Amino acid sequence: MTKIIEADYVVAGAGGVGMAFVDEIITHSDASVAIIDRKHRPGGHWNDAYPFVRLHQTSTCYGVNSTDMGGHGIDQVGLNKGCYELASGSEVVAYFDTVMRKRFLPSGRVQYFPLCEYNKSDDTAVSLTCGEKYEFRARKKFVDATYLNVTVPSQRDPDFEVKDGVRAVAVNELPKVITEHRNFVIVGSGKTGMDAVLFLLTNRVDPERITWVMPSDAWMFSRFDVNPGRKFSDPITQYAIGVLQCALDAKDYDDYFARLVERNLVMQLDPAVKPKRWRCATFTPMELEQLRRVKNIVRKGYLEAASSTVMKMSNGTHPTPAGAVFVDCAADGLPKVPMVKVFNGHRITLQTVRMCQQVYSAGFIGNVECNVHASEARKNELTQPVPLPYTDADYLRCAIQNSLNMAIWLTEPAVVKWINESRIDLFSPYLDFDSPEGIANIRAMGDLIQKAVPKMQALLESRRESAAAELADA
Ligand SMILES: Cc1cc2nc3c(=O)[nH]c(=O)nc-3n(C[C@H](O)[C@H](O)[C@H](O)COP(=O)(O)OP(=O)(O)OC[C@H]3O[C@@H](n4cnc5c(N)ncnc54)[C@H](O)[C@@H]3O)c2cc1C
């Protein structure tokens, strides 16, 4: 028999995004919530993460708004020295578990359905342990907190063929196999691949023993630039201003990116190799210096097959180092998904409304749901999805929408209030509408956005005119 479960909000997904949204509902309303997840505890992909993963943005601004994650100290040792602390994966999992057990469930307003598979097409779920079936009814809204479809390497098989006699492991296994192999082939150029290389190097594996398969180099952000700060003079706001000024000064599309490099707003692994990908990853100069110690970098496209003697790549072959283990770091953490309206009748689809800040975005949308008493059109105007950056053109699209969102947020008092009070906002300078200095700062920022966005749009248009360039981006 199917059990009927009613709640004001029915939320599919108890990852960071679902948790941040629900937290706002609990804070700003007296509504009830049902949360469904196929995992046994909240935290989503963090439950499957590799053991040495850490946040790459400071803990002080991660998670749900109501509950501090800690990490307010500045690291005094290690490769993150000088930046705010970064929680480890297990700390993140413990954090979300605590939020569920100590805040959500005791509120008496949250029903939690772990180990249940949700079916979006008919809003039913089935228990993965006992087979019990549920039909969910939302008095207010159904909320999709699974749409971003985060994937980490341990959640799927490697997408290269592993020939007989070769050992390939997900990055999660690296600490176990580190003592068993002469050589390591790190497959993947994203944040996970970089973390794996840093893990090997900090555990005194000679860089000569590391081969790094890098389908495409990625731009990186300096963590010092995105350290939280709520004053206009803080580096993170100066960073945002820099991105806009580069657009205003740029002679053409290529010149825009050249200026980002010139102003150190982005970093690259090898100054001689221009990155083609964007991945939202942050690094310290010390981490970059370590990564640069690895010289065996294979830039021949994607790994298609690994044998004990040769690696077949999409653009050629490369010898397999003797006794090597292949370490799969290649999952596309945040795959490209089409952007859809956040608010659509009886449904909310949680997406990114601030560049590279998924969890923050979910909290933001939760606040709009509760505190902006306006039409659906207005709510959507305030929550335009910001595309994830993959290519240069994507980065521009992302910067444009991010800037437009910043500008429109200033027009909504309930949003300004939330931003000013929000623990998870690492980015916005304090929006002070009461002092002449505050008003001048807000005006200056608004003017800059108004001038820079049309220029960014023109730069993007000039790129679109070249069909070949678009193809290269695809
Ligand atoms: C390695 C890594 C490091 C990151 N570091 C940072 C960082 O430092 N700072 C930052 O801001 N962002 C970071 N991110 C970005 C990431 O978007 C956020 O960390 C966030 O945790 C993602 O949460 P989510 O809820 O969208 O996805 P998930 O964590 O994947 O959660 C989705 C949940 O939905 C459940 N689910 C899906 N489908 C169903 C279904 N049909 N039925 C039932 N349950 C279902 C899943 O089981 C899962 O628990 C990182 C991402 C990765 C991969």
Image: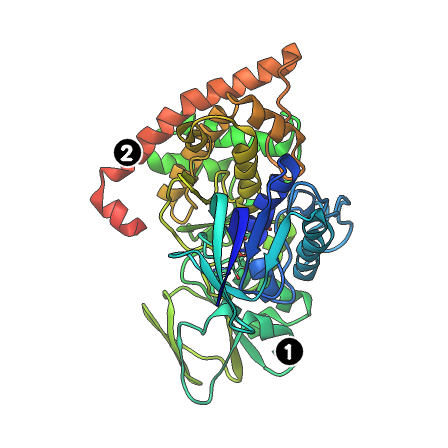
Residue 329, image x, y percentages: 50, 66
Of 39 and 207, nearer the camera is: 39
Residue 44, image x, y percentages: 57, 59
* Residue at 57% over, 74% down: 209
Q: Is residue 316 positioned above or below 399 on the image?
A: below
Q: Could you tell me the amino acid type at mark 2?
A: Glu
Residue corresponding to mark 1: 176
Ligand 1 in which quarter: bottom right
Residue corresponding to mark 2: 461
Which element type, helix, strand or loop, lies under badge 2? helix
Of 209 and 52, nearer the camera is: 52
Q: Are marks 1 and 2 in contact (CB under 8 Å)?
A: no
Examine the image and state in which quarter residue 100 appears: bottom right
Q: Is residue 332 positioned above or below 275 on the image?
A: below
Residue 200 appears in the picture as rendered: yes
Residue furthest toward the bottom? 165
Residue 264 appears in the picture as rendered: no
The span from disc 1 to disc 2 (Cα, nearest Å) is: 50 Å
Colouring convention used in this rendered image of the protein: rainbow
- Check residue 99 in the rendering and tell me which mark sits there, or answer none: none
Of 113 and 208, nearer the camera is: 113
Residue 258, image x, y percentages: 42, 38
Answer few, some or many: residues within 10 Å of disc 1's Cα (few below 14, many 20 plus, some between 14 and 19).
few
* Residue at 36% over, 25% down: 454
Is 148 displayed left or right of 289 in the figure?
Answer: left
